[in-house]
Amino acid sequence: MKALSTSEKQGVLYAFLSAFGFSFKAIFVKLAYASATVDAVTLLTLRMAFCLPFILVAAIPAFKNMPRPGLRDSGLLLLLGVIGYYGSSMLDFYGLQYISAGLERLILFTYPTITILIGILFLGKKADARILLAAGLSYGGIAIAFLHDASQTRDAYSVLIGAGFVLACAVLYAFYSAGSELAIRRLGANNFSLLAILIATAAVLLHFVLSRPLSMLRLPLPVYGYSVGMAVFSTILPIFWQSISIRHIGAARSVLIGTLGPALTLFFGWWLLHEAISLAQLAGTGLVIAGVLLASRR
């Protein structure tokens, strides 16, 4: 078997770091919830506020040569920014108040399959047996993981509520992913991503200002530490690491390594949050990963 080149080794390393960083987001959220009485809106506000300086550093030079978006493009950007980052993130943070980090990551991980189904249902794309099998594997795996979480608590209804929030998050992000194709063709991938996340950040900050008193920001230092960790280690750096990885080994191999994400979240949930792991949950994780890999094949 041919040995990996130095460039490929770097690509594999950065793909793993990216999967590691993204997988740790739910861990930071759960640790913040456990360390103080903080609600989803306030915690998401802290995350986006700490992300904002990094986003502006990237956005200011990028926007200098960017043509001004027209009215149609601006409306599409506003819709996708609100749906894709603000709406989906808010639902995700609400969901993590009720369910384990491992189950949350599994449900979120199905968004590529949901994106394909949206294309079939609303964009006229062709369905085939592979996609239906992928969906069946993914949602069968979620069902197994859900039953595991429900069996660990006396309040199965709370698990159902949390899973519903996170599934709605995945659906919104899938609509964002499907709709972003048009915006990227018109604005470019980098410009679109920066504009969308700036719109989402503004929406989150506006939500907080209109619905919460500033006294809600008087929180213990650990909450701020976890929020900085979310912003830097689980938002900004993974995007940067993923870009480097794709440059070295290509998108397909980078995505393949990214499927380690749910397993990493499961492990750290067990280690740091003392979340239970069972053979059923591991089987559910395997089914979800298999479904996403099958759906992602050409």
Image (cartoon, rainbow, N blue to C red):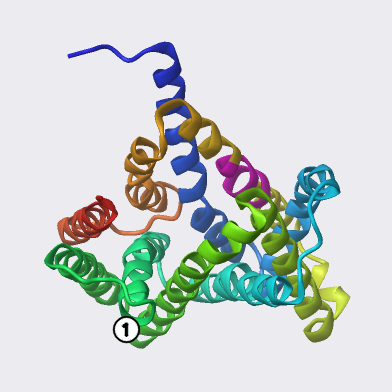
Nearer the observer, 144 or 148: 144
Does 50 appear above or below 137?
above
User: What number of labels is visible?
Assistant: 1
Does 210 appear above or below 70?
below
Please give the name of the residue rendered at 49% of the width and 40% of the height, measured from the top-left corner.
18
**What is the three-letter code of the residue carrying label 1?**
Ala
Does 25 appear above or below 73?
above
**Does the rendering let one see residue 39?**
no
User: Mark 1 packing: few (<14 Cα in 10 Å), some, or many (20+)?
Assistant: some
Does 209 appear above or below 110?
below
Q: Is residue 21 left or right of residue 283?
A: right
The N terminus: image quadrant: top left
Q: Is residue 269 magenta?
A: no
Q: Is residue 232 magenta?
A: yes
Point out the stretch of residues depicted in magenta: 230-239
Q: Is residue 204 left or right of residue 61?
A: left
Q: Position of residue 124 (x, y in %)?
A: 33, 77
Q: Is residue 166 left or right of residue 153?
A: right
**Does the rendering let one see residue 213?**
yes
Q: Is residue 142 left or right of residue 43?
A: left
Nearer the observer, 120 or 111: 120
Q: Position of residue 249 (x, y in %)?
A: 40, 28
Image-quadrant location for residue 68: bottom right
Image-quadrant location for residue 136: bottom left
Residue under numbered circle 1: 156
Q: Main secondary structure of the magenta part?
A: helix
Instruction: Give the structural element (helix, strand or loop) at label 1.
Output: helix
Q: Position of residue 166 (x, y in %)?
A: 44, 74
Please give the name of the residue rendered at 25% of the width and 50% of the height, measured from the top-left corner.
298
